[in-house]
Image (tube, rainbow, N blue to C red):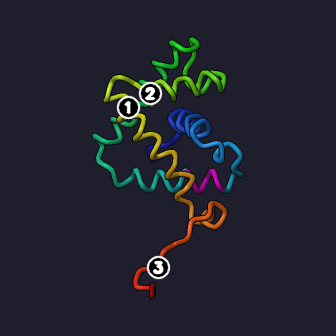
């Protein structure tokens, strides 16, 4: 299991800033998000997992310059500033890493089939008449 312990706490702090829906999810939704992401990440190469773990550390390093704390201990407005910096970073590798984390965060929420109706997502059935 890749997302556990401090890494899970940090990732969920990022997820809550990027996706306000996550911040108000009940424990079942949070557990579905964790399971969905950990199942997805279980099939990834160790090199990919190490890059994700390294980027989470980089986020904490950048966060230190915004408030002398790791990301999860910053106030929300400073957490948003860190995310904005990464989103608009002049360094392509930081933008790429941010978009990878952003994609995982969104997958954990919007990948839950239980939320499809609530978010207006209609599943297309292959082979159905048009």
Provide the major secondary structure of the magenta segment. helix
Q: Is tag 3's residue or tag 2's residue first in the polypeptide sequence?
A: 2
Residue at 45% across, 56% down: 39
In the rendered image, residue 81 lying in the magenta stretch gets the answer no
The x and y percentages for residue 19 are 60, 43
**Which residue in the protein does label 2 denote?**
86
For disc 3, the marked residue is: 125
In depth, the one of 12 and 4 nearer the eye is: 12
Crowd around label 3: few <14 · some 14–19 · many ≥20 (10 Å)? few
Q: Position of residue 84 (x, y in %)?
A: 51, 27
Whether 125 is drawn above or below 84: the answer is below
Task: Answer whether labels 1 and 2 touch (C-beta < 8 Å).
Answer: yes
The earlier-in-sequence mark between 1 and 2 is 2
The furthest residue to the bottom = 129
Tell me what residue is drawn at x 45 percent, y 88 percent.
129
Residue at the (42%, 55%) spot, across then down: 40
Q: Residue at x 33, y 50 (%)?
A: 44
Return the residue at label 1: 95
- Real-space Cα distance between discs 1 and 2? 6 Å
Label 2 sits on a secondary structure element that is helix
x and y, in percent, of residue 88 in the image: 43, 27
Specify few, some or many for label 2: CA neighbours under 10 Å numbering under 14, 14-19, or 20 or more.
Answer: many
Give the magenta part as a residue range. Answer: 29-33
Examine the rendered structure and indicate whether residue 42 appears above or below residue 122: above
């Amino acid at each position: 299991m890749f997302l556990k312990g401090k890494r899970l706490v940090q990732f969920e702090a990022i997820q809550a800033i990027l996706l306000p829906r996550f911040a108000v999810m009940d424990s079942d939704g949070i557990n579905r998000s964790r399971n969905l992401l950990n199942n997805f990440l279980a099939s990834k190469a160790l090199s990919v997992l190490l890059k994700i773990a390294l980027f989470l550390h980089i986020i904490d390093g950048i966060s230190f310059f915004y408030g002398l704390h790791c990301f999860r201990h910053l106030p929300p407005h400073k957490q948003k500033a860190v995310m904005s910096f990464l989103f608009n970073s002049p360094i392509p590798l930081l933008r790429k890493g941010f978009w990878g984390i952003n994609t995982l965060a969104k997958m954990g929420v919007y990948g839950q089939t239980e939320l499809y109706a609530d978010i207006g997502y209609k599943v297309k059935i292959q082979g159905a008449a048009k």
